[in-house]
Structures are given as C-alpha cells and as structure tokens.
Amino acid sequence: MAAPLDVCIRGDGVVGRTLALLLARDRLRVGLVQGPEAVAGADAGAPEVRAYALNAASRELLTLLRAWPDEAHATPVLRMDVHGDEGGLVQFRAEQQGAEALAWITEAGGLLERLGEALRFQPFVELLHEPRAASLTAVCEGRASITRAEFGVDYEVTWYAQHAIAARVRTEQSHGQVARQWFMDGDILALLPLGGPQGHSAALVWSVAQDRVGELIDLPVVPFEDRLTEASHGCLGRLSLESERVRWPLQLARASRWCGPGWVLAGDAAHTVHPLAGQGLNLGLADARELARVLHEREYWRPLGDEKLLRRYERARKSQVAAMQWATDGLQQLFAQDSRAFSWARNWGMRGFDMSGPLKGWVARQAAGRL
C-alpha cells in the first residue's frame, strides 16, 4: 500500500518542481504528478525554445535548492536597453543598482534538468503518473490547468490582440550581456542574451499583432531573418535562426480564487501576465516560496489543507501579482496606441524616466524581487 501523502502537486514544471523541493525540506511527503507542460496555445509538437529572465530573488531560491543552472545555461544581464518608437530610450545597468546582474537568462530545458537532478536526491518526493489523495493538493499545471476547473474556480482571461513568436537566434556580434527590447508600431521585440558572457546566441520573443503572426511564422527562413535584423536595427549584426519558430496567444488572466479547503493554486494556474517584462516565472517562483513559508510557519494543530491557513498565502501574493499585472498591462496598452500624440507622450516619458534616479532605482529593485 502506498504511503500517505502530505501534499500532492499537480504539474511538474519549474514552479511545481521548486515547490516540491521546498516542502521536502520540511520533511513533508510530497507526490509530484508528472506530465508535459506546454505553453498554452503553442504549436503542437513544437521544440522547446523558451528562456526565462530570472531575477535575484529567484536565483537565491534556486541556489538554495541546489538547482541553479551552470554558467553556460544562465547568462547574467549587465545592461538592459528599452527602446521606444520615436527615439525614447531607458537603460538599466547592474552597476548603478549595486547588483551582480539585473537578471539571468536561463534556458527552460536546462533549468528543468537541474530541478530534476535535485529531485532524484530527495527521498521525500515521489514522482507520480496520476494524482493521489493528500492533505493538500497544489495545482501548478499552468494556464491551461484542468484541475482548477474541477475545483470550480473561474479563470478570468483578457486576450491581447497579439501573439508571441519565440525562437533561438544566432547573432553576428556578441550580445555583450545586454538584454534589448524595442516597442514599435504596437509590436514588442526582445532579444535576451544566451550562451555565457561572450555568447553569440539570443532568445527571441516577438509580440506581434494577431493578424500578422501567420505571415511571420510562414515566411521562409531568410526573409524572416531579414525582417528580424531590420526590426532590431542591426544592433547585433545579422540575426540567423537556430531553431524552429513557436507561437502562442498572449493573455492577462487571474483566477477568481487561489485556494479552498484542501487545495491551492500557484504560478500560471493562478495568474498570467504579458511577457514584456519577463516576470511571469519570477511571480510563480515567488508563489512557491511564499506557500512553502506559510505551511512551514503554521500552528502545530492546523492541518495543511486548512482554508484559513491557505488564505494567508493568497493575501500575501495577490497584491504583488496585481501590481505587476497592472504595470505590464498598462505598458502594453500604452504602446499599442498608434496616434502621434501617444507616441510623443510615451517617448517623452521614457526619456524623463531614464533620468529619474530614485524612481528608476525603485522599479529596478521591484523587478529584481527586492521589495
């Protein structure tokens, strides 16, 4: 007969694996339900091209769990350049923040592999092919979660009129540990450095209008590379595809409830944001950290699935997630406007923000998880 579980985690993506390792440190018996986790809406059978911009708080958490990727799979970002469509520019530099790096760009596959290695040495985590009864069920299945609906939770989704195109690209010039982003004509193009400090590889995330995504996906390789090099203003020379292109629709979403008697949501199962700030996984890892803290500090007589206990986690995380959703949605809406008046105002604002000093520093600390 199988040993009883304290926590059953449904979803073995980055958030689910991280939560399992955190709970196992408290000697809780954890079941981790395995299953493929794909980007919701991505092309079926698409290659894994995702990369994550992880902040300092996420790095500390994964280092604690001995799951931080090696240098070849986690490239420090020393500078970030954010370009507007009329010459607006905001630059963030790690040295100005007194930080080792602004973020670390990690490959999804490498990160999952390191978490998997850590799990193999954790006797309190059992890998499952199907859910088992437990005192608490933690739902980390991503935005397309089935279990969330089983608990009667509404998932309020606002679809953007955009799709994301992701791929790996080869850069003619070294990226110099600089993350680059352009807001232009409603599109948002990001090139995130990969392959170490002097690498010539980058993760592409290109958010484009949904009526144009098919055209860009279907373009032959060379014309697509021409279009991409032009959109990036040739700042890294010629850009060449190193992978297939993957696309998925973009959304802002939040669950109506994050917990109930015996169950709790974390990560994309509870909330999603526009990828323009690269904060989606950071929010999910912060969920895992806070949930583990709340369970660790519970009163000795209170069961793991107690709804009042789980409400502490929900209250702690909802306000921070809402603030990030408000900020990313506001930026997306601002740059989606195509009138000259909006263009002038937002680029004037970008130049003012770049010289703002304390405000700019506060935003950088928020993005780094230094609340």
Image: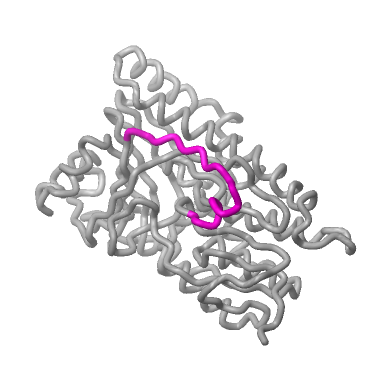
Specify whether 318 is left or right of 178: right
Give percent across and percent down for residue 153: 58, 46
Question: Which quadrant does the N terminus fall into?
Answer: bottom right
Q: Residue furthest top?
A: 341
Q: From where the camera sits, is residue 56 visible?
A: no
Of the pair 276 and 201, the residue shown nearer to us: 276
> Magenta includes 157?
yes
Name the image quarter holding residue 182.
top left
Kindly identify the residue that appears in the image at 44 percent across and 55 percent down: 52
Please state the horizontal and vertical placement of residue 244, each as a whole percent of the image. Answer: 22, 59
Q: Is residue 371 left or right of residue 269?
A: right
Examine the rendered structure and indicate whether residue 366 appears above or below residue 10: above
Find out whether residue 104 is within the magenta segment: no
Where residue 172 sits, quadrant-wise, is bottom left
Q: Which residues make up the magenta segment?
A: 145-161
Q: In this view, does 87 lie to the left or right of 358?
A: left
- List the single residue furthest toward the bottom: 1
Quarter occupied by the C terminus: top right
Q: For residue 309, say whether it is visible.
A: yes
- Check the image and report above or below for 240 versus 343: below
Depth check, front residue: 303 or 82? 303
Q: Residue shown at 41%/31% (left/top)?
A: 332
Q: Position of residue 233 (x, y in %)?
A: 22, 39
Left or right of residue 358, residue 113 in this image: left
Q: Count the marks.
A: 0
The structure residue drawn at horizontal position 43% and vertical position 24%, both measured from the top left corner, is 351
Q: Where is residue 10 in the image (x, y as percent from the top left)?
A: 56, 64
